[in-house]
């Protein structure tokens, strides 16, 4: 297992497609190809993506996680945002989300951030990574933060 930067890797198209399938609207094959092309340009131009990390096993993308400048319309005053944690179904329940979590928190700390923010509709999931509840957002999701000063020291990299 290896954690890599996905931004300029051969896995970037797969990352974009999996994000769209998980969190976006259904697209035809041609719509997906056009979407991937446009999204890749936005990522490479650095619009909102601070970091995109992928977990690779034997040349296969296992999962990924990102750090965004902003994430949605609520709380645009907060930055950075811990986002898009995803592990392919066949790799779930093997601890890979913890590897991704630790990698993105380490990256955020290296970049000088003291906290990261995340939003989710999952209950009792991100708390195991040290997330602390702040408030409910207008879309029904819950807003959390992770204190990098305290959580990093508890994690093993």
Image (cartoon, rainbow, N blue to C red):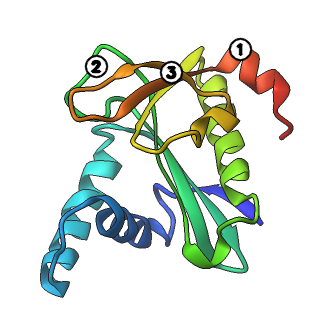
Q: Residue 40 falls in which quadrant of the image?
A: bottom left
Tag 1 secondary structure: helix
Task: Note whether residue 24 is visible.
Answer: yes
Q: Nearer the viewer, residue 91 or 68?
A: 91
Of labels 2 and 1, earlier in sequence is: 2
- Position of 113 with respect to 59 (left or right) is left
Q: Nearer the viewer, mark 1 or mark 3?
A: 3
Residue 105 falls in image quadrant? top right
The quarter of the image holding the N terminus is bottom right
The x, y position of residue 55, in whole percent, is 65, 62
Report which residue position mark 3 lands on: 133
Residue drawn at (83%, 41%) of the image: 157
The Cα atoms of the two marked residues, 1 and 3, are separated by 17 Å
SS category of the residue bearing label 2: loop
- The residues bearing labels 3 and 2 have C-alpha atoms spaced at a distance of 14 Å
Identify the residue position indicated by label 1 in the image: 149
* Residue at the image point whose x is 59% and y is 27% from the top: 131
Q: Residues within 10 Å of mark 1 (few under 14, many from 20)?
A: few
The residue sitting at 73% across, 23% down in the picture is 151
Pick the residue in front: 110 or 137.
137
- Return the x and y of residue 139 as percentages of the image width and height: 22, 35
Q: How many marks?
A: 3
Which mark is nearer the camera, 2 or 1? 2
Closer to the observer: label 3 or label 2?
Answer: 3
Pointer 2 residue: 75
Labelled pair 2, 1 in contact (Cβ < 8 Å): no
- Among the 4 quarters of the image, the one containing residue 75: top left
Reading the chain from its start, which is encountered first: label 3 or label 2?
A: 2
Marks 3 & 2, CB-CB < 8 Å contact: no
For residue 110, the mark is none
User: Residue 116: where, in percent of width, then height?
Assistant: 52, 24
Q: Sequence-wise, which precedes: disc 1 or disc 3?
A: 3
């Amino acid at each position: 297992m290896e954690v890599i930067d996905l931004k300029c890797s051969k896995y970037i198209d797969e990352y974009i497609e999996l994000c769209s399938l998980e969190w976006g609207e259904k697209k035809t094959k041609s719509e997906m190809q056009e979407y991937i092309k446009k999204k890749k340009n936005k990522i490479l131009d650095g619009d909102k993506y601070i970091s995109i990390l992928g977990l690779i096993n034997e040349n296969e993308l296992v999962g990924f996680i990102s750090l965004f400048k902003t994430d949605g319309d609520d709380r645009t005053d907060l930055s950075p945002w811990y986002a898009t944690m995803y592990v392919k179904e066949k790799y779930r329940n093997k601890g890979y989300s913890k590897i991704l979590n630790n990698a993105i928190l380490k990256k955020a700390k290296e970049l000088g951030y003291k906290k990261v923010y995340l939003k989710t509709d999952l209950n009792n999931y991100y708390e195991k990574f040290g997330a602390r509840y702040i408030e409910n957002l207008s879309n029904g999701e819950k807003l959390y933060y992770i204190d990098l000063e305290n959580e990093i020291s508890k994690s093993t990299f």
